[in-house]
Image: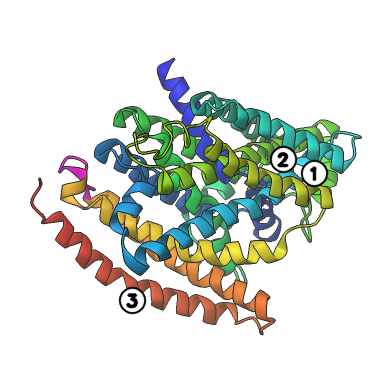
């Protein structure tokens, strides 16, 4: 029973990365390329697990979560201010911008099986998320999200199974990397929608006080199951011929499998939206707390109140309430916050490689990880690959944001990928040198 609760607890990570954006990206990959890009999700799942385990291990071994480690490393001068602005901008603004997509996606799923108006469904989802967050008990909330992920996973996997995909096609697509013409940026999109920066702060914040063995077990099962659900969404998307949309997919499923398949898809999409609508504000609040909460709370000089950043404290609640409010307002207006999303993509594109590099250095720092918590060779190889891909994602996201913001001519896919690879390779060597020096430091 303890291990089951651990899986449910860490399913909060799956709930965070399987949202309407993931459903759209994965289903579009299936609609456009069939099973050919499943290997990208296999890599994404391994990368997500490697980063999440490193972030959680940092907290368990050192006693400091990711935000606190960042604050300690960059505490003075311009670098300290820049890091705070970068992290808060990417996490809080990014969560607020994508919260609208989460709520709209959840409402779209509910609308497929309901006669209620989109605005009513938006208010219902917003109220449900607010109630769950107001409870102020992270463990209970994480397990609730775990149940939502279970519902979502069953819905998508049952739908995928009923489509009867060929096993040989699934195996070939999962383990034989291919890059069809025009699919390069979509591959990066599949990685980027699975490996997201705010999940690292969320997972690191939730790991405090837990045993490393339990963390690794729960994370591994939850993330792998999340990856399987994403792959199931690709299979479901492969049923669509032509341009992808939620309505077109629902129509195809109804024609091929009957009304119950449409209902399964509606439940899965709604659960994906609701779970992400809860985790995005929660991640923003946990990140803000890790960066601003005093390590020693409360003093006789009128300092920080002991409960100001607690889960039921007004500061913690004000952050998640603000993020949730932005999503509900944009959802009621039925307008996607395109400018904010563009800025958030650019900030996340910069933040992801920064956090990946920082994590790689932290888990190779003998003083911080106390020897026994240091990365092994395999973990370093995986994290090194993730850092390289994170740089490629960063270049891609920033380029797309600049093109959309200034109305520039989009660069060719081949050119963009070429420069992404060059910059990734150029950044690997100095990072490895620094990591090696940190491993040689004497333990104190």
Q: Residue furthest left?
A: 442
Q: Quadrant of the N terminus?
A: top left
Residue on which disc 2 sits:
269
x, y percentage for residue 84? 43, 58
Question: How far from the left and from the top, in percent, is residue 254?
Answer: 85, 39
Q: Position of residue 230 (x, y in %)?
A: 59, 45
Numbered range of the magenta stretch: 369-376
Left or right: residue 186 versus residue 370 is right
Majority secondary structure of magenta residues: loop
Colour option used: rainbow
Q: Is residue 386 visible?
A: no
* Residue at image mark 3: 426
- Tell whether 352 sits left or right of 426: right
Q: How far is disc 1 from disc 3 in space, using C-alphas?
A: 43 Å
**In the image as oriented, which residue stretches furthest toward the bottom?**
409
Sequence order check, earlier mark of 1 and 3? 1
The part of the image, by quadrant, that contains residue 94 is bottom right
Of the numbered discs in the image, which one, if any, rests on residue 108?
Answer: 1
The answer to whether 86 is drawn above or below residue 221 in the figure is below
């Amino acid at each position: 029973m303890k291990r089951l609760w651990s899986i449910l607890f860490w399913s909060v990570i799956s709930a965070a990365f399987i949202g309407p954006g993931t459903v759209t990206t994965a289903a579009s990959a299936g609609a456009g390329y069939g099973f050919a890009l499943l290997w990208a999700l296999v890599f994404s799942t391994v990368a997500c697990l490697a980063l999440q385990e490193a972030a959680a291990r940092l907290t368990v071994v050192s006693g400091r979560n990711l935000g606190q480690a960042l604050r300690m490393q960059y505490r003075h001068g311009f670098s300290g201010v820049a890091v705070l602005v970068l992290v808060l901008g990417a996490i809080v603004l990014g969560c607020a911008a994508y919260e609208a997509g989460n709520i709209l996606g959840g409402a779209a799923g509910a609308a497929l099986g309901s006669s209620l108006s989109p605005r009513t469904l938006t208010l219902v989802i917003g109220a449900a998320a607010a109630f769950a967050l107001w409870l102020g008990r992270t463990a209970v909330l994480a397990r609730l999200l775990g149940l939502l992920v279970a519902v979502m996973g069953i819905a998508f996997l049952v739908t995928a199974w009923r489509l009867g995909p060929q096993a040989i096609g699934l195996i070939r697509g999962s383990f034989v990397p291919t890059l069809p013409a025009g699919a390069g940026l979509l591959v990066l999109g599949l990685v980027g929608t699975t490996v997201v920066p705010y999940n690292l702060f969320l997972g690191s914040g939730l790991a405090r006080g837990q045993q490393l063995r339990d963390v690794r077990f729960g994370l591994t099962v939850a993330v792998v199951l999340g990856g399987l659900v994403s792959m199931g969404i690709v299979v479901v998307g492969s049923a669509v011929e032509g341009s992808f949309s939620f309505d077109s997919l629902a129509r195809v499923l109804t024609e091929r499998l009957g009304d119950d398949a449409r209902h399964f898809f509606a439940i899965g999409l709604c659960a994906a939206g609701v779970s992400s609508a809860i985790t995005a504000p929660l991640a923003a609040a946990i990140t803000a707390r890790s960066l601003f909460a005093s390590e020693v709370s409360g003093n006789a000089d009128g300092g920080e109140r002991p409960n100001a950043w607690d889960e039921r404290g007004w500061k913690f609640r004000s952050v998640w309430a603000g993020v949730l409010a932005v999503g509900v307002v944009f959802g009621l207006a039925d307008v996607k916050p395109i400018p904010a999303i563009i800025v958030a993509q650019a900030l996340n594109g910069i933040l992801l490689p920064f956090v990946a590099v920082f994590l790689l250095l932290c888990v190779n720092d003998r003083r911080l990880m106390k020897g026994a918590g240091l990365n092994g060779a395999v973990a370093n190889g995986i994290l090194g690959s993730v850092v390289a891909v994170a740089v490629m994602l960063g270049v891609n996201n920033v380029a797309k944001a600049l093109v959309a913001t200034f109305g520039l001519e989009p660069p060719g896919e081949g050119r963009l990928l070429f420069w992404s690879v060059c910059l990734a390779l150029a950044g690997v060597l100095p990072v490895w040198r620094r990591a090696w020096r940190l491993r040689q430091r004497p333990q104190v």
